[in-house]
Image (tube, grey):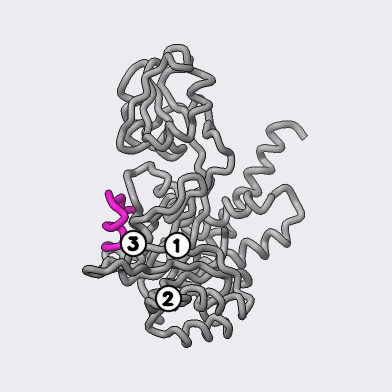
Amino acid sequence: MDLNELRGKIDGLDDQLLDLLSKRMEVVKAVGELKKHEKSIIYRPEREKAIIDRLTELSQGMLSRSAIEAIFLEIFAVSRNIELPEKVAYLGPEGSFTHQAAESRFGAMSEYISLRTIKSVFDNVETGRVRFGVVPIENNQEGSVAETIDMLCERDVKIVAEIPMAINFTFASMEDNPKKIKKIYSKDIAFRQCREFIQDYFGDDIKLVEVASTSKAAKLALENENSAAICSHIAAKLYGLPILFDNIEDSKHNTTRFLILAQDVLNQKSENDKTSILAKLSDRPGALVDFLKEFSFRDLNLTKIESRPARIKDSFKYWFLIDFDGHYQDEKVQQILEKYGDSLVFLGSYVKLC
């Protein structure tokens, strides 16, 4: 076959794909009508994971799991917009890593609202102004995000899903030659996490300008000659800023965990779930130890425990945010929830991804 024949074959396959996708969306629309009547939630991460798992097992060709996931997450996002368009708030600005995390799950077609603080995201979810919110919870290099944990303690929202995302910084500029660059814009944390790249390419002969966000850095690099930005891939794409180097971070294991928030959402069980709770325990010696033993006795694996001030007047008491393997419908988990009753706040059970 020559090139034109191969291209013709691809065109024919694309026609078949389009026809199949259109038929899929017709079924999706019918599902949306049923869910609307039953007032069911549209976003079902456990169902989406089950589909990707099944397709990965079926795949005998060139598509890896990551490739299948990239294709079908976008199909799922388009499907949700056909079922019932829903607003998604995220910690901004536009082009931030949280924006990138949100778009990785809700797709390019969803309606997004960029908010300036984590508190604003929680407020918008709690009041119903948006259906979902996306916020960072922890980074494996920098630690937990205290404001997110505080808001989980104070707001009536549930965790629908978690999003682990590798944090990859790009070096973007209108200049095609790094030797022309005299100034780099970025956020303080990005400079810290890209020290080796900066030193290798520019040494001490470069001016580093700290700005409020990597999105702002991309905008400034677009507007100023002889400058560049260390920013997210989505920020460079947003401002049309050419990327000179990708993945410039020092650590190749830099990952941030994000949460998807909603009101009163109870996910169905999958084969691999995680549950998050808040524990406010009695102020007596051994109270925390006794509580943690409950998980050991039932062979439930704890994956995270972190304390935060309870913010009670004239008191130094603490809440404990606890993540563990299992689903709230599991008998072992139910035993703990029932035994400790009002001392616990259930935050959600969701598909475990990290």
Amino acid found under the numbered disc labelled 1:
Glu
Horizontal and vertical percent position of residue 61: 75, 51
Find disc 2 in the rendering and name its residue.
346
Q: CA distance from mark 1 to mark 3?
A: 11 Å
Dots 2 and 3: beta carbons under 8 Å?
no
The mark that comes first in sequence, 2 or 3, is: 3
As helix, strand or loop, the secondary structure at mark 1 comes to strand
Residue at horizontal 38 percent and vertical 69 percent from the top: 319
Q: Which mark is residue 306?
A: 1
Kind of residue sitting beneath label 2:
Phe
The residue carrying pointer 3 sits among few (fewer than 14), some (14 to 19) or many (20 or more) residues within 10 Å by Cα, namely some
Q: Measure the C-alpha gap from mark 2 to mark 3.
A: 15 Å
Q: Look at the picture and state if 320 lies above or below 281.
A: above
Decide if residue 129 is in sight here: yes
> Which residue does the image show at 55% across and 79% down from the upper left?
294
Q: x%, y% of residue 93?
A: 32, 44
Q: Which residue is mark 3?
A: 150
Residue 209 is situated, as x and y percent measured from the top left of the image, at 33, 26
Q: Amino acid at mark 3?
A: Asp
Identity of the residue drawn at 33% across and 30% down:
210
Magenta segment range?
Answer: 110-123
Callout in the foreground (1, 3)? 1
Which residue is at the front of the view, 56 or 109? 56
Q: Secondary structure at mark 3?
A: helix
